[in-house]
Image (tube, grey):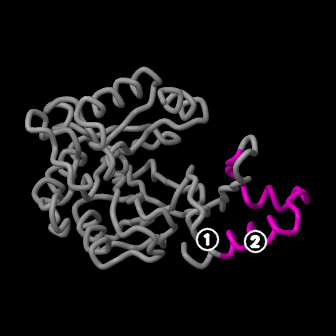
Amino acid sequence: PDDLAYSLKDMGFDLMLTANNHSLDRGGKAVIRTLDVMDEAGLRHVGTSRTQEEYDNNIQVMDVGGISVAFLGYTYGTNGIPTPKDAPYAVNLFNTDYLTHMSTLDEEKVRGDLEKAKALDTDLIAVMIHWGVEYQTKQNAYQEEIADFLFANGADIILGGHSHVPQPMELRTLEDGRQGFVCYSLGNFISSQNDEYTDTTAVLTLELTRDNETGEAQVTGYSYAPMYMLDREAGAKPRFQLLDVYAALASGEAGESLTRRLEKAVADCHKIF
């Protein structure tokens, strides 16, 4: 519903990744309409495009606390739906074989996109990416290969999703001395899933630091706030509520059963992330 875009904006979101395996579920016209509504709501977006020109320059530069960050966005595939013949630019895909094996990185395209991002001369470059295998709480070798490629070609931050469950995050020192941060998946945010780990997520906070004498910026730290998606079962209003786990535990109003689930969410976050 259109209201979702306006509600997300009201909640404080500024930028969305629109590339995922469901981007083409309703065809090319829906890709266009989604972006039109987001524009009306004041939400910036990367990952899908209405025109070739938009595709060729699908980078958003955001001011993050006075530090400029260039954002790019990709998905591994589209659930076997080919991009429209008259709009092959509709979705940013990082695989050349997105309709079959989904295992061959389009190095030329991704490297070219990162070169365009570097040419914008921002402080940092971030890539939001839809990848990995559903319901696995650990990244696979292909995700690690892609992350290494993104870092080697200029990315500083990689923010992943798709698995529906949390996957690890890490801050690493890259070969050129930069600090690179990757979160393979934060898991679901808003969902109605009840399988283990699908109701557990986190709000991530990255610490970005710039040396104003040298002009160099990097990720210098991170933290996260565990969140739990409470399903109050059919008939309840609201049925679903996203809880700040620490706040819910501190309130003393959770009850024995919910307290156990909240404590498990904290433990799962620490174990997986």
SS assignment for the magenta stretch, majority: helix
Q: Which residues are magenta?
A: 239-267
Mark 2, secondary structure of its residue: helix
The furthest residue to the top:
40
- List x then y, in percent, for residue 143: 31, 71
Pick whichever, 129 or 180, lies toward us: 129
- Name the side, left or right, on which 24 lies relative to 164: left
Q: In front here: 34 or 179?
A: 34
Q: Please report whichever mark, 1 or 2, sits nearer to the chain's N-terminal start.
A: 2
Residue drawn at (82%, 68%) of the image? 257
- Pick the residue in front: 54 or 32: 32
Q: Residues within 10 Å of mark 1 (few under 14, many from 20)?
A: many
Residue shown at 88% from the left, 63% from the top: 255
Find the distance from the CA under tag 1 to the CA under tag 2.
10 Å
Residue 183 in the image, given as x and y percentages of width and height: 45, 65
Q: Which residue is mark 2?
A: 263
Query: Residue 25 at what x, y percent from top left?
Result: 30, 43
- Image quadrant assignment for residue 174: bottom left
Check disc 1 and report its element: helix, strand or loop. helix
The amino acid type, in three-letter code, at marker 2 is Glu
Image point (57%, 68%), residue name: 195
Residue 222 in which image quadrant: bottom right
| Apparent side of residue 162 relative to residue 112 in the rendered image (left or right) | right
Which residue is tagged 1? 269
Q: Quadrant of the C terminus?
A: bottom right
Residue 20 in the image: x percent, y percent? 33, 50
Q: For residue 35, what is the image quadrant?
A: top left
Q: How many marks?
A: 2
Is 189 left, or right, of 62 in this rendering?
right
Question: Which amino acid, mark 1?
Answer: Cys
